[in-house]
Amino acid sequence: MNARAAAVALRDVHKRFGAVHALAGVSLDVPQGEFFGLLGPNGAGKTTLISALGGLARADSGTLAVMGHDVTRDYREARRAVGIVPQEVVFDPFFTVRETLELQSGYFGLRRNGEWIDELLERLALKSKAGANMRSLSGGMKRRVMVAQALVHRPGVIVLDEPTAGVDVELRQTLWEFIRGLNAAGHTILLTTHYLEEAQQLCSRIAMMKEGRIVALDSTASLLSEFSQRVLRVKLEGCELPPALAAGAARDAAGWWRIPIADIAHVEEALRALRAAGATVASLEVAEPELEEVFVKIMHREDAVL
Amino acid sequence: MTGFPTLLYKEVLRFWKVSFQTVAAPVVSALLYLVVFAHALADHVQAFPGVTYLQFLVPGLAMMAMLQNAFANSSSSLIQSKISGNIVFILLPPMGPMDLAAVVRALTVGLGVFAATLWIVPIPVLHPLWAIAFALEGAALLGVLGIIAGIWAEKFDQLAAFQNFLVVPLTFLAGVFYSMHSLPPQWQTVSKLNPFFYAIDGFRYGFFGQSDVSPWASLAFATAALAALSLVTLQLLRSGYKLRH
């Protein structure tokens, strides 16, 4: 494993499926140890990109490398360096949870992997199901087994393709606690998800894809500060918004005013202005910048190409 | 090869977990063929001098069961994994699939057929090494063909078509129930183009020391067919045909 290489390095990757240009020149570097988010609407090319990283799909042109290993020329080392949790819940109905993990270890040439399998079962709350057939598990449990399968060979790069779809809140928290621990231990995490609040909380850097291209790539904090803002949401009774606060404000269908505020200290100034105007505040809340707003703005930009 | 022993273990475990269907059922089918055909034809057919029809039938039925089960093992494992999607767990690690488990299943079924027919009709084993060689050859041939079918088929009915319109006719027309010499000359020529015929004829030689063609010719023809299919399979796996997009 090359210590200085990027965990994931993509250069001008193209992939077509017939008339569909699924990847239209994607270039990207994810440094080692990063918790990286890959976001985009359905059909943006995220899963194709992940498939190409894992060798499930072959790029028409361009290069892809994992931990410095080219996924085509040096595919054995590249595949040992990456663990992928596929988007679809898939399992082999012939085997138990433990057999599934033992077989997956064997595929990577690991003969005595029992201790790590036990730890995975413990930390993913699957210990009591170790002897259960895969068919008997709930959807959330099957997904956690898939996470364990991706980790049996302790890969440096862990790719999670919508890992929390259909997983209940408690199990989701367990999963994220585990993944955060792996990231803290030095593993690089590449996450795709439609739960943007999860990406906002977890990812230090984010790429957004649209129609096979990366249309935004920056730290989460920079994206939030550039494309979203903190707003004071107020509902007024029996009066209109004072002119002093009207600049940039907007009212939604439910009657809430959204007043942009640059800093949390400006909340008091806005309240003072409301009181001075004799306005009665029925409800009030401060909404922090949201990745969802960033996502919507970027996806609707006409020139959404970097 | 990394992971290869695990894949073999997985495939053997897979068929063994449903051994009622994958081992016991083919043995019972072979027994039924034996009982029915023996009753209907025993007095009418003399295949080899000094060999009763019942004795003649047993190696043929055993080999037919082996061929069909070798094909069923590799092809069904692949198509099930493809359709359910769990084939990703084999495609993601750094290794390639092989067909040895099909051979293991075929030999298990073959041994089962012999064990079950032993008390009905004892047969000699004059050249056991020839019998073992052709058992391995036939099972490997159909195991590889099963991989090709499993890779090519995208639906269960495509696989069923492959099995019903190719594998079953070729096994039935390979001399399981009759000696090739009892056929009209033109059908003898057609039979000689069927690689399954050589597997069955050579296998029979291992028991009776008699066959329609020389066991060396059978070995050469069956090995050539196995080599050709293996090369096609390796090329399919290398290219990722219908497996990697």
Image (spheres, rainbow, N blue to C red):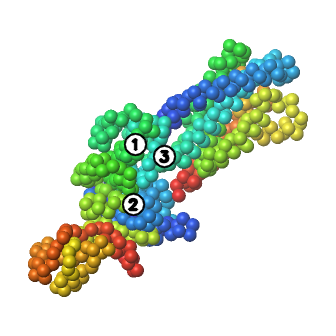
Q: Is residue B223 visible?
A: yes
In the rendered image, residue A135, in percent from the top left (x then y), is placed at 45, 39
Q: Which of marks 3 and 1 is in front?
A: 1
A231 left or right of B156 in image? left
Residue under label 1, please give it.
A138
Q: Residue at 39%, 76% (x, y): give it.
A: A300
Disc 3 versus disc 1: distance between alpha carbons? 17 Å
Residue under label 3, please give it.
B86
A161 left or right of A33 in image? right
The numbered mark 2 sits on a residue in which chain? A
Depth order, front residue of A213/A255: A255
Kindly check if marks 2 and 3 are in contact, taking CB atoms under 8 A apart as contact: no
Marks 3 and 1 belong to one chain: no
Q: Is mark 2 on a helix, strand or loop?
A: strand
The numbered mark 1 sits on a residue in which chain? A
Q: Which of marks 1 and 2 is in front?
A: 1
